[in-house]
Amino acid sequence: MTLSPDEPLPGDEVPVEFLGLDLAEVQRIVLTALVEDLGDPPRDVTSESTIPAAQTDTAELVARADGVVAGLLVAAEVFAATSGGAASFEARVSDGDRVHRGDVLAVITGPSRALLTAERTALNLLCRMSGVATHTRRWADVLQGTSATVLDTRKTTPGLRVLEKYAVRAGGGTNKRMGLYDVAMIKDNHKLAAGSITAAYELVRATFPDVSVQVEVTTLAEAEEAVAAGADFLLCDNMTPELLTEVVRAVGDRVELEATGNLTLETAAAYAATGVDYLSVGGLTHSSPILDIALDLRPR
């Protein structure tokens, strides 16, 4: 069985490039997931026992629930890996599209063993990503017409961050930072360790002069201190809409502002009305249920 990924199979019908999904990273994740499922040496004992090696079939990826799809290229890479590039993958929808129960998302034709060997890994990744996109779209819909955008966090599944954050973008949200390396975020423990917001900011700026610095604040005074120090983005943690409105009035013309902490779909509109730029929701990645999708072989 070949586990070396071939060229990406989806064509222009899966517009992922503008969303920044890195193919090499996708292939790395796919191969890791397949090794987990197939063992060493790689094998699917059921499919290899019951299906002739030369048999080919066509299968459909079918939505079992309404939602937003994300991860078609990822699923395609799984089928490419198990088939050595022999499987064809025809996407019927695009990442970010709303789909309904019964919709055919893609049609795959290739060696039957390879299709069934790929099935669970492809679905695990596709269902997870589509679940994140579906959850994100609910927030994006609530915020439509406001100046606020839903934002994710670093509360991602270890090893799947690039896919989950991509799914957030496919669902209408955004990413503010990918990890600890690209943006400095001064939180409460950093403030305590350094002695103050100002001291922490100055230490970060001296060490990494070119890195954007974000600061978590809980009061109006902290917000004003952070802005005076030079921060360009504030995380307003667990503030009421009333307090957040004060912060927006005081510093909103100088920095980007994010509301974070205990936000719900029911309170989203009230927080957006304060004038903040973002609503940060860790649940987009740590608590999204999957979107139910199945792989169905067409009758022979």
Image (tube, rainbow, N blue to C red):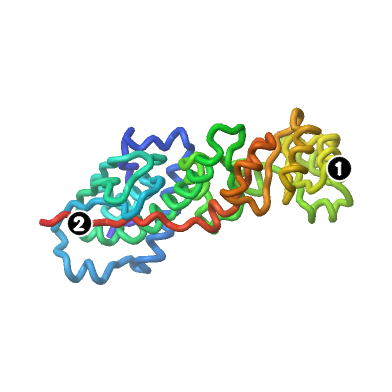
Residue pictured at 36% horizontal, 49% vertical:
66
**Measured from the top left, where is residue 274 in percent x and y?**
69, 37
Quadrant including the N terminus: bottom left
Residue farthest to the left? 300
Q: Which residue is mark 2?
A: 297
Q: Which residue is mark 1?
A: 221
Q: What is the distance, in whole Å, between disc 1 and disc 2 at their CAs?
A: 62 Å
Q: What is the quadrant of residue 222 in the picture?
A: top right
**Measured from the top left, where is residue 179 in percent x and y?**
62, 48
1 vs 2, front mark: 1
Residue 2 horizontal side relative to residue 272, left or right: left
Q: Is residue 267 above or below residue 297?
A: above
Q: Secondary structure at mark 2?
A: strand
Q: Nearer the viewer, residue 176 or 267?
A: 267
Q: Secondary structure at mark 1?
A: helix
Residue pictured at 79% horizontal, 56% vertical:
189
Q: Residues within 10 Å of mark 2 (few under 14, many from 20)?
A: some
Question: Quick check: can you spot residue 19?
Answer: yes
Amino acid type of the residue tagged 2 in the rendering: Leu
**Measured from the top left, where is residue 144 in percent x and y?**
53, 35
